[in-house]
């Protein structure tokens, strides 16, 4: 059995958090879902996650703002989620530290493959 993947899901649309969170939990992930970007920054600053899934457009702080605050906090991967993906957004997100940008609605097969990769033991040495 593969190890649980700790996921922080940040999206101001609570329904999106519930649906995607349930799907991730069904695959064995331990999911923390947060709809307020400021709460997300607080949580992501004290806990390290295997994967942070971060909505781009949120009130008060953009996904890039949140990314800047949490990128050096020990998370293995941070992925931006957006319904408005273009080359410019993808380039900015990668410059700021995101490892990927995924269009909403999320390609679940692609997301689950990423999670399976994260479940593999990290090589040391």
Image (spheres, grey):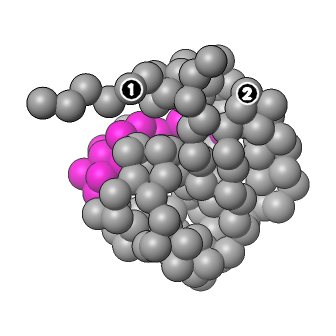
Relative height, residue 17 to residue 45 (above, below): above
Coordinates of residue 57 in the picture (x, y in percent): 60, 62
On screen, residue 67 versus residue 95, left or right, reads: right
- Mark 2 nearby-residue class (10 Å; few <14, some 14–19, many ≥20): few
- The residue tagged with tag 1: helix, strand or loop? loop
Looking at the picture, tell me which residue is in the foreground, 18 or 81.
18
Instruction: Say which residue label 2 marks.
Output: 27
Magenta region: which residues?
Answer: 90-104
Q: Quadrant of the C terminus?
A: top left
Lower position in the chain sequence, tag 2 or tag 1: 2
Instruction: Say which residue label 1 marks.
Output: 121
Q: What residue sits 48% from the left and 65% below the top?
A: 47
Q: What residue sits 58% from the left and 22% below the top?
A: 2
Q: What residue sits 38% from the left and 26% below the top?
A: 121
Q: Are marks 2 and 1 in contact (CB under 8 Å)?
A: no
- The residue tagged with tag 2: helix, strand or loop? loop
Residue 53 - label: none
Queried whether the magenta region covers residue 45, the answer comes back as no
Coordinates of residue 31 in the picture (x, y in percent): 69, 49
On screen, residue 16 versus residue 78, left or right, reads: right
Looking at the picture, tell me which residue is in the foreground, 54 or 88.
54
């Amino acid at each position: 059995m593969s190890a649980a993947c700790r996921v922080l899901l940040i999206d101001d649309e609570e329904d999106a958090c519930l649906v995607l969170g349930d799907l991730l939990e069904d695959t064995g992930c331990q999911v923390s879902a947060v709809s307020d970007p400021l709460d997300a920054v607080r949580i992501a600053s004290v806990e390290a996650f295997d994967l942070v899934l971060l909505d781009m457009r949120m009130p008060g702080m953009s996904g890039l703002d949140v990314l800047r605050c949490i990128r050096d906090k020990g998370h293995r991967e941070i992925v931006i989620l957006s319904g408005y993906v273009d080359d410019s957004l993808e380039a900015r997100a990668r410059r700021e530290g995101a490892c990927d940008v995924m269009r909403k609605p999320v390609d679940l097969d692609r997301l689950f493959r990423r999670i399976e990769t994260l479940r593999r033991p990290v090589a040391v040495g």
